[in-house]
Image: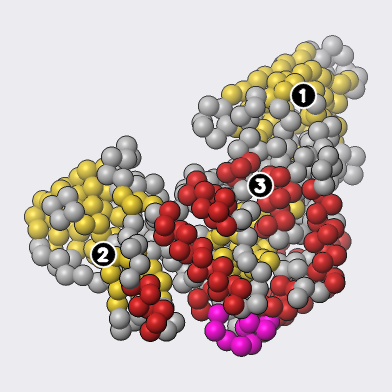
Amino acid sequence: MRSCFATLLLASASLFLQAGSTVPKTGGVCFRFDDNKPPEHWKQMGALFEKYGFRMSLALVSQDLNSRRSLEVLRELSGKGHSMMDHLPNHAVYQIRARTQDEFETYSRLPIADHADAKKRRVYFKFERNDAHPRNKRFQASVRGGELCEYPEAMNRELGFTRKLLMPSTGKVYGIRIRNGKKMLMDFWGEQISLPDQEKTEFVLLAANAAIQPSDELLRFLASVSRANFLAAGLPAPRAWIQPGGWECFVSAEKISGIYGREFGYCSADCIPGSSRLNGFFNDPAAGLQRFRMRPDFTGLDNGQDIPAMKRKIAEAIARRQVKIFISHMWVNRVKGGWDAYIKGYEELLQWLKSNRIPVRTQEEWAEILYASKPEPGENIMPSLSTDLDADGIPDGYELQKGARADITSGTVFIPRGGKLHLSDLGGLEKGNNRFALTVKGKAGMVVYLDFFFVVRSGKNYSERRQFRLENDQQQVLEGVVNVKPESVTLHYGVRYSNGEKDLEVRNPVFKP
């Protein structure tokens, strides 16, 4: 049973989504920890988040939740408002490991089963293949001792780990595993196989993460197993699906939204095909699908970076009205100082987040706020030139190019000849006419250029430029109107000038309806 505190926490979050209410376009952070870990690590990290009033998200491999202590800790964390996410029953889409003989026999008889290994109690599932996909590539290669060789040199980089090959002569699909620099062919599921040597045989490189997808029946089965596992563990049914990395082709957001979303009530997912860095924005034109493409950032202590690097990423995201999801696998063996250094680093980071009032929420909460809420329409979404949360001397969200410099205290940027103030991927765009304004001071005769470059996922980006000739040396406001098309996702913004030697001073950027 959830604690009273967790109930209050969820009730508080739901205030954002009351009918007719709006939410501020304030970015924030989610911390996601993937795979099953020692329960005491989960417990200590959860206590640390609770200390600062935050909650974390755990992506669980539910078929392997067999430890009594793990279940106790997870139930306790769930009761306190931390989210439990579906990382597939066995961290895989096309196979599952049965826990009992009865379970193995049941899974083996399913129509979606391709074959089974009784010794390992593992069942392997069928897949759907699109031989006519326009990005499939035909080529010739030889097979010697199980190694793919004599393929076109131009395809060397494409023939990598996780890519799948169809051999038309056998009608079978193979995967590539790199061993000692050799491209060894395995079966689709990654099992060792024996292939006869063949010279100059035709292959088809199947379009990555597109030409192979699971059937709806397989996804329903996996969702049902996950739900049953969570409920049996005393956890709420999961509401977020997390793509496992590794050998397999990735599942499309359309597939996951159709089965997990519509049929099983999932509100979010991390799907890789079709996603990009362009996610986590208010007023997204494809909100219904983007909630299933909530991709993480791998910056972290167990991936070779430090806490200052994470602070920089967060400061940039907040300034640009973005939500940043960080992923960690708690690989503390990669962290100098091990677990103690790892959790100490997170304490420093969470303390910084708390002191700067940066929102930290679970992935499911952010999915509802970003994609089911109504953002406040009248806000100026331009980052302030006087905010520097990461203390690097540069206004958060901006780039100072070719000699441009900033005075954070006064909120002023000084742009020299040839320099530029630049801002990338500003989110929260209101569609339709927007007013822009910028306070400037320069030399009479300077021509100031304001460039607005709008990013569209289809690739049909477009730009607008406004230019102003300064009539005097006094401070003045440059302003006008730019139309934001409905398909626009983010804005790149730039300020520069010509016809002058003196620095251009800029303050108070504005972009709002």
User: Mark 2 or 1 closer to N-term?
Assistant: 2
Query: Callout 1: helix, strand or loop?
Result: strand
The image shows residue 418, relative to residue 282, as above or below, that is: above
Q: Quadrant of residue 11?
A: bottom right
The image shows residue 451 at horizontal and vertical percentages of 68, 24
Residue appearing at x 80%, y 61% in the figure:
10
The image shows residue 197, relative to residue 22, as above or below, that is: below
Classed neighbour count for the residue bearing mark 3: other residues with Cα under 10 Å, few (<14), some (14–19), many (≥20): many
Disc 3 marks a residue whose amino acid type is Gly
Along the line of sight, the residue nearer the viewer: 494 or 109: 109
Q: Which residue lies under the disc numbered 1?
A: 434
The image shows residue 202, relative to residue 308, as above or below, that is: above
Query: Callout 3: helix, strand or loop?
Result: loop
Q: Which residue lies under the disc numbered 3?
A: 280
How far apart are labels 2 and 3 at the CA level?
A: 37 Å
Residue appearing at x 53%, y 68% in the figure:
226
Residue appearing at x 60%, y 32% in the figure:
455
Report if the CB atoms under discs 2 and 3 are less than 8 Å apart.
Answer: no
Kindly tell me whether residue 449 is visible in this rendering: no
- Magenta range is 65-73
Q: Residue furthest bottom?
A: 68
User: Mark 2 or 3 closer to N-term?
Assistant: 2
Q: Is residue 433 magenta?
A: no
How far apart are labels 3 and 1 at the CA level?
A: 21 Å
Q: Which residue lies under the disc numbered 2?
A: 187
The image shows residue 315 at horizontal and vertical percentages of 75, 51
Along the line of sight, the residue nearer the viewer: 185 or 69: 69
